[in-house]
Image: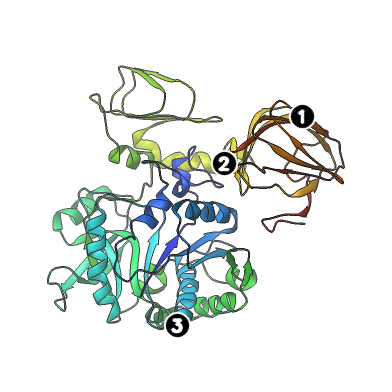
Amino acid sequence: MIVPVILSGGSGSRLWPLSREAYPKQFLPLLGDTSLFQATVQRLEGINGCDSPLLVCNDLHRFLVAEQMRQLGIEPMAIMLEPVGRNTAPAVACAAIHAAARSEDALLLVLPADHVIRDVAAFQSAVAIASKYAETGQLVTFGIVADRPETGFGYIRRGKGIKAFDKGKCFQVARFVEKPDAETARRYVDSGEYYWNSGMFMFRADIYLQELEQYAPAILAACREACRNAASDLDFLRLAEGAFAACSSDSIDYAVMEKTGHAVVVPLDAGWSDLGSWSALYDIGEADDSGNVVSGDVVQIDAHNSYLHSEGRLLAVVGIRDHVVVETADAVLVAHKDRVQDVKLIVDQLKEQGRSERVFHSRVCRPWGSYQDVDLSDRFRVKRITVNPGASLSLQLHHKRAEHWVVVKGTARITHNDDVMNLNEDESTYIPIGTKHRLENPGDIPLEIIEVQTGSYLGEDDIVRFEDDYGRTN
């Protein structure tokens, strides 16, 4: 049985301002109507013997993962929550322990959630080849057939071909290579012996744990304890924080693949991209006659070979070449395509300054829906709140702010201390400081309200929860 393990951590900081810590690139519909995460799940359809996916994410993204799986109509094997980020080796170790407990012959297919694969049939063919070798105890990695020198990826040098099943389709791994300089990358590609390191793997769960026992026993011991003391929380499986945090932060490559004698590589030529930068998104986009990839409300004059993206407002550009311009509700990025890897430095600077634009969009997702700031000052804050059909905010109160609610779409059920009432469109209510209250949507369409907060402090942490459908009570 193939158990897909989808790793959906990471912040995608090089795609800021679209990708942010609370809503990173894997959950964004960057290339169509579905997110990269959803596309990763969908490309599993048609793989023989494929079980429900086991999802690994962090606490901040748990409701995003659950909601996007609900939209696909797919029930996951589990949604495993990492209390802290510890790279891929511990994450996959916990997934392997969980899968092996369900089936002794579980075969793990490890996939990052933020990759693009254009040729799904070629991907599934490579998985079928890899599964034959993985079943015999090999640890398979997928090497991307390089079509150009690339300094942003690690490389895998292939060794002798393995003729057990498909001649020319699987090779021993000679060595893993760190990101090279431009001249070295050119030599790698010209030789035909090197592949890009995709970060995708396939191996038996028990073999991976066996190799981890040999080469990184401390990681395995910590992960066993984290799984043994894991706790169920609604639809989530929370790994024990103390044990998991004790793991060293190592990749699968470093912890196992570079040391084992059972590493093999299956070449993959399937239109792959890790979308690691704005230039990568430009490369897979459809360019117009001027070489521009355009998304949203954009007007251009004498612009060439640029990526131009507007989330809402009109974006107008004149006389630019080889640039990336991205507009969102609360931030605008302008960068030369040669410098897009340095966008991460902007995110680092925002972190040093304690700015929320690093973490949140102006529209913030919650398990019940979302809210978006309309205006903000020292003594007031205006939000547009959307509550999904049948959803409910927590029963709560605030010590430092009052709230005024106006219903603009749908029907709201309001708990106001001991009273419960319904409000329709164009009706309003007032929630004084210290009042226990709750907002619910009993209808079949999204509820939209305008909330005006007033008070001495308007931070999101001024909240005391008494009841909550999502396990967030104080």
Can you identify the residue that label 1 sits on? Answer: 428
Can you identify the residue that label 3 sits on? Answer: 213
- Residue 436 left/right relative to 308: right
Quadrant the N terminus occupies: bottom left
On screen, 78 above or below 39?
A: below
Residue at 74% in and 28% down: 427
Query: Is there any visible trace of residue 258 in the rendered image?
Result: no
Q: Residues within 10 Å of mark 2 (few under 14, many from 20)?
A: many
- For marks 1 and 2, give the CA distance: 34 Å
For the residue labelled by badge 1, is the local secondary structure a helix, a strand or a loop? strand
For the residue labelled by badge 2, is the local secondary structure a helix, a strand or a loop? helix
Give the residue type that dot 2 points to: Arg
Q: Are marks 2 and 3 in contact (CB under 8 Å)?
A: no
Residue at 58% in and 38% down: 445
Comparing labels 3 and 1, the label whose residue is closer to the camera: 1
Where residue 408 sits, quadrant-wise, is: top right
Can you identify the residue that label 2 sits on? Answer: 358
Comparing labels 1 and 2, the label whose residue is closer to the camera: 1
